Image (spheres, rainbow, N blue to C red):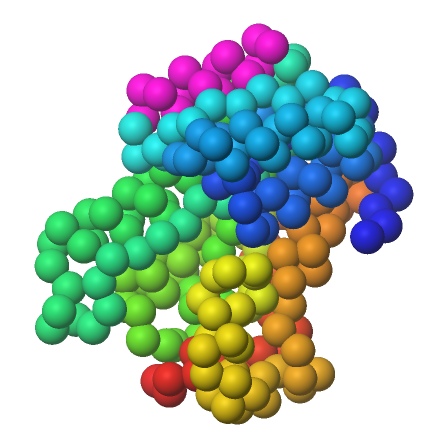
């Protein structure tokens, strides 16, 4: 993976950074010199990833295991990251999750959880990071999903990802006057080792093969396909892009092999 921009002395905080897209983004940023602040709920893989990035790229990596719905801990981590690494130049709000599928089966508790993880956690992180991003004239990327614009089963997930897309447009106006850009990236169904689509490929090859027809090129994108787009939106090369939602879905049609 080639990415020629220099992020030396431009600290970036990535949530959900112990695996998948978060880790791929952190690895790419480390390869171009970015000091990193990384968090996720699981301490062991987070610490393992941080140690590898320090050794491989010789960059400072500050980590903490936390849940983004724990507002005081998340805010404290963001402040501490700025003190340790210097004011943040970038934020990647990558954490996502969902509970509830169809309306009839979805409780207020499911809505509360999904909103908290997908929307409130991202907004808490951005609110806490804004004073630092203002100092650096930095950039934030909200990780949305193809499900935020294309209907599929998963009401709470799709609705909250759509909220992130619209939030990016609103925040571009609100924070743009401070010199802070906010964009969203909407990945398609990514092929991540030992995650849902990789497991489907192993457990039900026929259904997986049928699913690949939703992609004009016949292949699912990977985190390594999406990470450079996030890094680009954090970089000065994208300084005229603000309030956008950028799809990185390989032209995907349906977000699921199970129909609408």
Circle count:
0
Report x, y in % for residue 235: 75, 39
Residue 209 horizontal side relative to residue 124, left or right: right
Q: Is residue 32 above or below residue 159?
A: above
Residue at (36%, 65%) from the top-left corner?
158
Outermost residue toward the front in this view: 203
Q: Is residue 158 magenta?
A: no
Which of 212 and 216 lies nearest the eye of the viewer?
Answer: 212
User: Is residue 259 placed above or below 83 in the rendered structure?
Assistant: below
Look at the magenta stretch and give its main secondary structure: helix
- Residue 249: quadrant of the picture: bottom right
Tell me if 11 is positioned left or right of 98 in this view: right
Who is closer to the viewer here, 111 or 66?
66
**Residue 56: % across, % down:** 78, 31
Image point (47%, 70%), residue name: 199
Q: Is residue 168 visible?
A: yes
Q: Quadrant of residue 239?
A: top right
Report the quarter where the C terminus lies.
Answer: bottom left
Of residues 244 and 100, the one drawn nearer to the viewer in this rendering: 100
Q: Is residue 135 visible?
A: no
x, y percentage for residue 65? 43, 27
Q: Which residues are magenta?
A: 71-84
> Quick check: is 75 in the magenta stretch?
yes
Q: Quadrant of residue 70?
A: top left
């Amino acid at each position: 993976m080639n990415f020629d921009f220099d992020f030396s002395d431009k600290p970036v905080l990535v949530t959900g950074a112990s695996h998948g897209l978060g880790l791929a983004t952190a690895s790419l940023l480390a390869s171009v010199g970015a000091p990193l602040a990384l968090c996720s709920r699981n301490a062991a893989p987070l610490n393992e990833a941080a140690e590898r990035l320090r050794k491989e790229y010789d960059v400072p990596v500050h980590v903490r295991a936390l849940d983004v719905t724990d507002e005081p801990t998340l805010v404290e981590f963001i402040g501490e990251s700025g003190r340790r690494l210097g004011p943040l130049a970038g934020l990647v709000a990558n954490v996502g999750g969902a509970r509830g599928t169809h309306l009839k089966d979805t409780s207020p508790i499911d809505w509360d959880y999904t909103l908290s993880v997908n929307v409130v956690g991202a907004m808490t992180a951005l609110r806490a990071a804004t004073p630092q991003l203002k100092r650096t004239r930095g950039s934030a990327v909200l990780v949305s999903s193809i499900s935020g614009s294309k209907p599929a089963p998963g009401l709470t997930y799709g609705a909250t990802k759509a909220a992130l897309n619209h939030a990016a447009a609103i925040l571009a106006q609100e924070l743009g006057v401070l010199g802070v850009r906010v964009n969203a990236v909407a990945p398609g169904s990514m092929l991540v080792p030992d995650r849902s689509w990789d497991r489907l490929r192993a457990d039900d090859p026929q259904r997986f093969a049928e699913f690949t027809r939703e992609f004009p090129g016949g292949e699912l994108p990977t985190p390594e396909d999406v990470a450079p787009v996030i890094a680009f939106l954090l970089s000065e090369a994208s300084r005229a892009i603000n309030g956008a939602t950028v799809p990185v879905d390989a032209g995907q049609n349906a977000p699921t092999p199970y129909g609408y």
